[in-house]
Image (tube, rainbow, N blue to C red):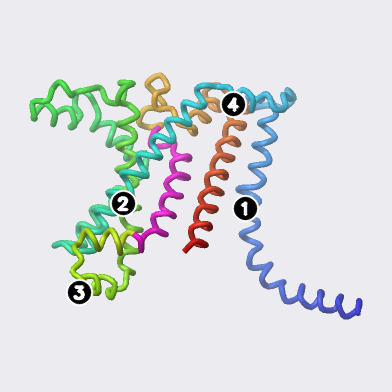
Amino acid sequence: MKKSSGTNLLHELKESIPAYLLIAPTILVLLIFLYIPFINTFRISLYNYKGFGEMTDFVGADNFVKVLTDTKFYMSFLHTFRIIICDLVFSLAIGFFLSYILFRGIRFKKFFNMAFFIPYLISNVVVACIWRIIYDPTIGPLNQFLAILGLENLQKAWLSNPATALTAVTVTWIWKTIPFNMLILYANIMTLPDDYLEASLLDGASSLQQIRYIILPYLKPAFTQLALLTVTNGLRSFDLIWNMTAGGPAGYTEVVTSYIYQKAFESQRFGVASAASIVMMGAMIFINLIAQATKRRRDNNE
């Protein structure tokens, strides 16, 4: 029996060799670009390290304590989640509205489909430069438009005013993310069987009733995935915000990634920055686990 079991195991291993060879490149990429850097980041987080030379000043968990007791870190998390929440509400809603318009059909549909998607194709750095010009207090189109309307009292230095800076950055972020949400929702609406809508029309359903009782329930899985992507992308947001405000004024647009960047490359506190990045990764994993558990529970109930 033992000999037979050993023979079967050896036979199974031989059959699995092609599968292991196929996944080997993926495993290698994960090791090089994910697991090894993570181990190195965790190692750095245990030292008082300035980014050069030998790591000799071991501080243990002290860097994590500094991060978790730093009010600026919590403020950066608060700013990040404010952007994420606004993105979830407005970007998904506007994206659905545009996708529904395209689904219903309008003249020059292909042109509008391309025009709506262009913002997503522009790099975040270019988007930041464009919107910095729009928000410019002297030559910016926004303030000039307000002046034309006779609303000079609403003119502001949008990106340097603590009361408006984060809102201005959030509007730009939403503008950038709408096209992707629109495209995914439009692609999902196009898979909706015609029988559903035709049957509802025979029953006398209005367009609003079709949206509420047919289209939105059908798009629920797509909304769930987009919400998860919105949260993870929002937590990783950096280049657009950094090129617009660099976290200013006075930290009012500081997000988690800009906090980490500032600690690492401006303050040369790589240990603290590494600890902050691990905390952020832990938050992302926690949010993903909650989302997956919620999705699994909902699927079981259905």
Mark 4 vs mark 3: which is more N-terminal? 4
How far apart are the alpha carbons under marks 2 and 4? 36 Å
Residue in view at x 41 percent, y 52 percent? 226
Q: Is residue 142 above or below residue 2?
A: above
How far apart are the alpha carbons under marks 2 and 1? 30 Å
Q: What type is the residue that disc 4 sits on?
A: Leu
Q: Residues within 10 Å of mark 4 (few under 14, many from 20)?
A: some
Q: Is residue 230 magenta?
A: yes
- Tell how many labels: 4
Residue in view at x 52 percent, y 21 percent? 71
Q: Main secondary structure of the magenta part?
A: helix
Where is residue 219 drawn, in percent x and y?
36, 60
Q: Residues within 10 Å of mark 1 (few under 14, many from 20)?
A: few
Which residue does the numbered mark 3 point to in the structure image? 202
Q: Is residue 189 above or below residue 49?
A: below
Disc ID at residue 179: 2
Circle 2/circle 3 CB separation < 8 Å? no
Q: Is residue 9 magenta?
A: no
Q: Of 240 and 88, which appears nearest the observer?
A: 88
How far apart are the alpha carbons under marks 1 and 4? 29 Å
Mark 2 vs mark 3: which is more N-terminal? 2
Relative to 50, 244 lies left or right: left
Callout in the foreground (2, 4): 4
Which residue does the numbered mark 4 point to in the structure image? 68
Relative to 21, 175 lies left or right: left
Q: Quadrant of residue 16?
A: bottom right
Which residue does the numbered mark 1 point to in the structure image? 30
- Under circle 3, the secondary element is helix
Q: Of 301 and 273, which appears nearest the observer?
A: 301
Callout in the foreground (2, 1): 2
Q: Is residue 277 above or below residue 288?
A: above
State the extent of the magenta-drawn residues as a range. Answer: 217-241
